[in-house]
Amino acid sequence: MLNKLNIYTILTIIDIEYCLTARQLYKLSNVMPTGELTHTIAESNPDSQFLMKPLLGEKLKPVLSNLDDGILYLSKIGVLKETINIVSKSTPLFNSFSDSTTFENIVASDQKYVAGCDGIFVQEQGIPKIIPVSNDAMVEIGVSDDKMTATLTVYPSLPGGKSLQVTDVLKAMQKAGIKTGVDKNTIKTTLLTSSNRKQPIRDVKVAAGKLPGDGEDGRIECTIDWQIHSKPSVNKNGTLDFHEIHSVVAVNKDQVVGKIIPPRKGTRGNDIFNNTIEAPLGKAADISSSHNVYVSTDDDSTIHSKIDGFLEFTNSSIIIKEQHVVSGNIDFHTGNISGNGSLKISGSVLNGFRLNLRDDIEIGGNVGDAIIDAGKNIIVKGGFSGTEHGKIKAGGDVSLKYIENQNLYSNGTLTFSKNIVNSNVYISNYIKGSGGGSCIVGGYTIAGQGIEVASIGNDSGTRTIIELGYDFSIREKIESNRQKIEEAIEQVKKIDRQIISFSEMKRLNPTQVESLKTIAEERKSHLSQVESLKEQNEELKNKTLEPSSALLKCTRKIYPGVTVVINGRQLEIKEVMNGKTFQLSKEGEITF
C-alpha cells in the first residue's frame, strides 16, 4: 500500500520526532492523534520505516529565511549542530515509489530515497528536500535604498568551519557591484570582533558614497558702503570733525545700489556603485523683500534705486526709504545728515549741526544755531533761536512757532504762531502770523507778496524793517553781482600795478611785450565784466521798484521805529497805529 500512496500525503500526515518502524508507529497511533490513515498505513506495512519528521508550516519559515545559495549556515541561525535534527549524507529517508519524482539533494538508492548530502530534511510547498548545512563563517552585504551606503553582517564559523578573510568580504562586495568608498579597516575590525566573540556582528557600515556638495545660494550684494560707521571724519588739518559721522546712507534715484550674485552648483558626488550624482544648484536670490529698487533691463544683475532716499541693507534685502527717521535729537550721536529724501526728527537740532535734504524736513523740537537746508518744506514744531549763527533755507514753505536772532529763507510761505524777533527773514511769497499774539520785532523781514501779522514793533521803538513787493532772490542776485564787481576791480588794480612795473623798464623784450599784451586784454575783460554786472544790477534794482499788489496787514498795533518799504517806497511809522493795511496806491505811494 505504501508504494501506491502519494509521498506528499505521507510526509504531511506523519508528525513524529524519531525514526520508528511501522509496528512502533502502529503502537503510537493508538495513543497519538495521527489520524486513521496513518493507522491504516502502519497496519498494512508492518516492515516499513518512517525515518524522520520533516519541518512543516510555520516551522519551515525560519529555516528558509536563513538560506544563502541553498546552504544553511548554522551560525546564522545561532544554533549548534546538535540542536537541530540533521540528516547525514546517504541516510535513508523513505521507500521508493511507483511515480518517478526528482527531489533536491535527495537521491534514489536501492529502492529507497536517501540524503544526497548532510542537511535538514524539510518540506517546501509540499515537496521534500534536503537543505545543505555548513559550519563556515558567512558574510552578508546590504545596500541602502539610495545606494549611498553598504553594510556588512558577519556570522562567525562554528567548530570545524572556515573563517572569513578581508578578501572574502571584498569579493562579496565586488559581486554586489560596490566599487568605491570601501572602508577596509572597518571590515577587518568587524571580522576580528565577530571571530573573538563568537557572535554575529550586524549592519556595520563598510562603504559610503560621496554626497554632492551643497550649491551656493544666490544673494543680493550691496555695492555701496552701507555700514553706519558712527566715527568722526578727519579734516584736512588732521583734526576730527565729530559733526560728520555718517549716520545715514543716502542714495539717488536710478543709482546703482546692488548686484545679484547668481547661485552656483556644488561639487559632484557619487554612490557606492560609482554612479555620478549631480550637485544641486543653489537657490536664486530673492529680490521680493527689497523695496523701492528695480533690476536693470540692460543688465539683470544690477539693482538700482527707484527713488531718492536712504538705504538700509538687512537680511540680504536692500530697502530704500523716502524718509529717514531720527528718534531723538540731531547731536553727536547722529552727526550732520544730508541726502535726497526727507527727514523726520522727533527731537531738536542742536547748535553746530547741519541738515541738507532734497525733500521735506520735519523737526519735533527746537532748532538752535544750526544750518538747515531743504529742497521742499520745513516744519519745526518748536522755535528757531540762537545767536544769529543759525540758518534755515527751504525751497518750499516753512512753519514754526517763533524765530529769535536767526536767519530764515523760504521760496514759499512762512507761517508762525508767536513772534519773529531780531531776525533776518526772507520769504518769496507770504508771511502769515497765525496767532492773535503774533508779532514781528526788530531785524529785517521781506516778503514778496504780503505779510499778515497781529503787531509789528514794540513800545521801546526797536528798529524794525518790513519790506514787500519782490522776490528776495533778486536782492541775493544783486549782492552776488556786487561781490563779483569788487573781485573784478581788485583784479584790475593788480593788473594796473603790473603795467606800471612794465612801464618803468627802459626796453621790453619780445616775451615781456607779449605778457603786457596778455594782461592788457585781461584788464579789458575785467572792466567789461564790471560794466555788465553793473547793468544787471541796475535792471534788478528797477525790478524791485516796479509797483506790485503786495499788502502789509497789521491786525492790531504797529509801533514807532518800524519802517515799511513797498517796492522801494518807504514809510516811517511815527506813532502807534491800530489795525492798518499798507499798500501802494495807483500813484505809487504807500497808503493805509
Image: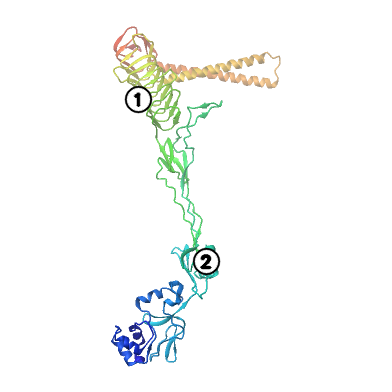
Quick check: 307 above or below 12? above
Colour convention of the picture: rainbow
Q: How far is disc 1 from disc 2 in space, using C-alphas?
A: 88 Å
**Residue 567 on image: x %, y %:** 38, 15
Q: Is residue 433 above or below residue 174?
A: above
Q: Residue at x 38, y 75 (%)?
A: 61
Q: In this rendered view, identify the residue nearer to me: 87 or 321.
A: 87
Q: Residues within 10 Å of mark 1 (few under 14, many from 20)?
A: some
203 w.r.t. 538: above or below: below
Give residue 259's position: percent from left, percent from top: 47, 44
Which numbered circle lies on residue 279? none
Q: Kindly check if marks 1 and 2 are in contact, taking CB atoms under 8 A apart as contact.
A: no
Q: What residue type is labelled 1?
A: Lys
Indicate left or right for 392 with 239 as reference.
left
Question: Residue 192 — which label?
Answer: 2
Displayed quadrant of residue 377: top left
**Residue at left 46%, top 48%?**
218
Side of 512 where 99 appears, left or right: left
Label 1 sits on residue = 381
Estimate how packed mark 2 is, as few (under 14), some (14 to 19) or many (20 or more) residues with alpha carbons within 10 Å. Answer: some
SS at mark 2 in the image: helix
Q: Which of marks 1 and 2 is nearer the N terminus?
A: 2
Q: Quadrant of residue 549?
A: top left
